[in-house]
Amino acid sequence: MLKHWPPLNALRGFEAAARLGSFHKAAEELHLTQSAISQQIRSLESFLEQPLFFRTGRSVALTDAGFDLLSTTQSLLQQLAVGIRRLEQYRKPNQLVVNSTPAFARHWLVPRLGEFHRLHPEVDLWLFTSDEVPDMTSQTIDIAVRDDLSAQAECSFRVLLEDRLYPACHPRLLAAPASERTTLHGEREMDWSHWQVQGGEDIGQRNQGLNFSDPGLLLDAASQGLGIALVSELLASDLRSQEQLTPLSARQVRGPRWAWLVHRDSEHDPLAQSFCRWLEQRLT
């Protein structure tokens, strides 16, 4: 990596002069004097220790090195411009940043966001998903809704729902003998040991099978007929209503605890309050 970089202004001046084929036109485009453009390019050539232009009277033409640098410079300036424009999303006046797990976002929140948007079209919601619990003190997040939360500094914490778990599979697997059904294993509460410890009945689950770290993928696998899984009542609600999942037992066991963290700076924000009220009505 270079220890020293040429000035950005010199690169901008070079790119404009090379693209337009004229120091004068480059000066007009950048609202500079022609002598300023000439000085920028001379300093760039001095830095690179080679000429970038052939100068013949008032006309200029790129050297081979100039052609090479032009391609690199245009790509650099384009990426920089895109990156700067992308920063606009961080200062939208009505933006609300909500964090959740990928599984909650995909299987519960996103299917219901249309309703929230119809009720509150003024909210410019940004859904940020992560596998890890966010640090609300260092990250720009207004609300976190997850099943792995605990209290954090500078935030209000509230449990919204005590979930339940039950074994389920795709309806077409019901006709297959229990011994022939693949067992799908998850992590934390979605592991079958949780079912066994809490007194669930034996439905043919086995220790071996397919394993998933993401509850969302576990649900997808079960709904596509890959095997039997221990699923969240909350996250599986849509798949069950669409008849892509069916319970294998009437019994249920204790599941994850869904909660929210609302940052102190967002507690009295009308946008955050609108989302919290809507979420509370849908979950509790």
Image (tube, helix red, strand yellow):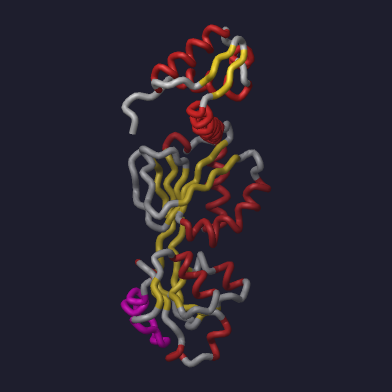
Q: Is residue 110 above or below residue 184?
A: above
Whether residue 232 sits left or right of residue 112 in the image: it is: left
Q: Which residues are magenta?
A: 192-207
The quarter of the displayed image where residue 214 is located = bottom left
Q: Which quadrant holds the N terminus?
A: top left
Q: Position of residue 47 (x, y in %)?
A: 39, 19
Q: Position of residue 51 (x, y in %)?
A: 46, 20
> Residue furthest toward the front?
56
Task: Please tell me which residue lies in front, 25 or 231.
Answer: 25
Name the residue: 49% across, 58% down. 104
The quarter of the displayed image where residue 264 is located = top left
| Secondary structure mostly seen in the magenta stretch | loop
Name the residue: 36% across, 76% down. 192
Whether residue 238 sits left or right of residue 150 in the image: it is: right
Q: Is residue 201 above or below residue 127?
A: below
Name the residue: 55% across, 90% down. 175
Name the residue: 57% across, 10% down. 32
The quarter of the displayed image where residue 123 is located = top right
Task: Please tell me which residue lies in front, 111 or 81.
Answer: 81
Residue 229 among those drawn in magenta? no
Residue 77 shows in the view = no
> Residue furthest toward the right?
118
Task: Please tell me which residue lies in front, 36 or 58.
Answer: 58
